Amino acid sequence: MEHGSFRNDTHASFTLAEEDHTLGNALRYVLCQDPRVTTATYNIQHPSLERVSIQVQTTGDPAREVFRDGCQELMLMNRHVRTVFDKAVAKFKVEEAARTKNAEEELKKQRDLFESMDIESN
Amino acid sequence: MSTKNKEEKRIVTEAEKIEAKNFNIHDLPDVPTGLPPHLELQRTRVICNELAPIHTGGIFYSGAYKSMGVDNSVNLEKFNEDFKVDVISLDETDIVFDMIGINAPMANAFRRILLAELPSMAIEKVFVANNTSLVQDEVLAQRLGLIPIAADPRLFEYLSENDQPNEKNTIVFKLHVKCPRGEPRLKVKTNELIWLPNGSEIVKESGGSDSKPKTYTSFSRSQDSFPEFANNPITPSLQDILIAKLGPGQEIELEAHAVKGIGKTHAKWSPVATAWYRMLPEVVLLKEFEDEEAVELVNVCPAKVFDIEDMGEGRKRAKVARPRDCTLCRECLREGKPELEAKAKAKAEAKAKAKERGEEKKAKPTEEKKEWVPQVELRRLRSHFIFTIESTGSQPPDVLFTEAVKILEDKCESVIAAHSEVDWS
């Protein structure tokens, strides 16, 4: 839901239902970073109502476009986070497998050495 | 020699005029670019003083440093370039990983989603046939609800009020334990919860005679036939959680139905034991700690952040060895300088003398305290988060984080969709 003015579309307030600080703060952060934005704030009018109100003021571009671009950018940032995380986990699992394999081989070598020493002492 | 007294007149050429027009002070080799160090510190670090941290709020506004000619905006390309993830440890239930280049609002969003908005399966309805134990029905039901169930919620659907419980949205467990007379007290643990893949066995009382008795669930096929559960029965995540204790002659007979839900509704549906993050600590020595002071500093820190390094000729110096282990206990900040002890002594003596002279001074508590001089600075890096996720067993922790990020993505998508539905023309 957007509250704005028909004459001046650089200022607008957007209400998101069934949302809270999770999305509100993240969106506000992304909007602040946009060079077209003069001010971006979010607030929750009452904690019992699950509603976030985001205010955007821009330097000339229509506020709803800037808001939409902000949502888009947050979405793409999340996608990137997911890709990088998956790669990091895969890499870690490969390294972990290599490490355990090396450790096992080391242990086996030591055991063989120990056994051969026993034979010698006998 | 003669030019010293005369003023040399030159004609400014066109080339020089163009050069003057295109001149940018930042092109000169020794003009510093970027922010001055104190502002950079304020922008990138939280400084943890003895009493409270400062600069805790992030400066995100893109034009914050416009007057200095520095652009504070972060666009998608820059974020993609700078963002890194390092997994420190990973096993079936826990993961510890570093996220570098991300910001607090997003990291907190992930944490909030992990705790409250990721679905999992938990017991919601309990049909008690017989309960002669000392644990009341409702208390028993509440305890059963909190038991973590090792079933992937992505394989199930939500059960709403109008739906019939069927094999796609319900898991049915049975618990029937009796403590025989003459035997010692019995502990009822979660290994007694038996999975019923064919659905509920409690028959509903119906007026007429039906060919097939109606139960509280309507399974059209056995959950055993699903490939995921074929040789993999659904059980609680841990088999030795104590549910109740039975004395001789007491019995519990009940059926428990587990459904899908999210942590926002009730904490039993939270798929993580907990999830938290901390920012990377940075410990900076503001002065050279030598010899005794160095040893004192190393001994004072309970997390063993500092180390002694030998400088030769028996001289020692303290250095920061493991800043990552710093727990911000601030023990290193509480030590006063040795010279200050002498100062404090002198002050106390002066006070005593004043008292002798009969001057009465109001006892100010701050005067008694040693003067605190910062010798060590504890900081946190604002864009480096050490995330820890402990899963309860329904899904591995790396899957949980991926799902959490997906949920945030879906939220953004739904906002965009709702936005573009309305015709603004």
Image (tube, coloured by chain):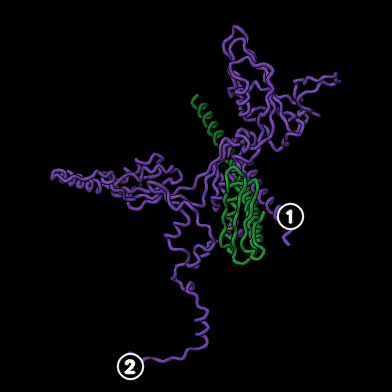
Q: Position of residue B140 (x, y in %)?
A: 61, 22
- Chain B representation colour: purple
Residue B250 appears in the picture as rendered = yes
Question: In screen coordinates, is B294 left or right of A82?
Answer: left
Q: Write the residue at 64% across / 16% down.
A: B131
Chain on which label 2 sits: B
Give the quadrant of the C terminus of chain B: bottom right
Q: Secondary structure at mark 2?
A: helix
- For the residues labelled 1 and 2, the Cα–Cα distance comes to 83 Å
Which residue in the structure is indicated by mark 2? B2
- Report the amino acid beneath label 2: Ser
- Report the amino acid beneath label 1: Glu
Q: Secondary structure at mark 1?
A: helix
Earlier in the chain: of badge 1 and badge 2, it is 2
Query: Which chain does the green colour mark?
Result: A
Which residue in the structure is indicated by mark 1? B421
Q: Position of residue A67 (x, y in %)?
A: 64, 58
Chain on which label 1 sits: B
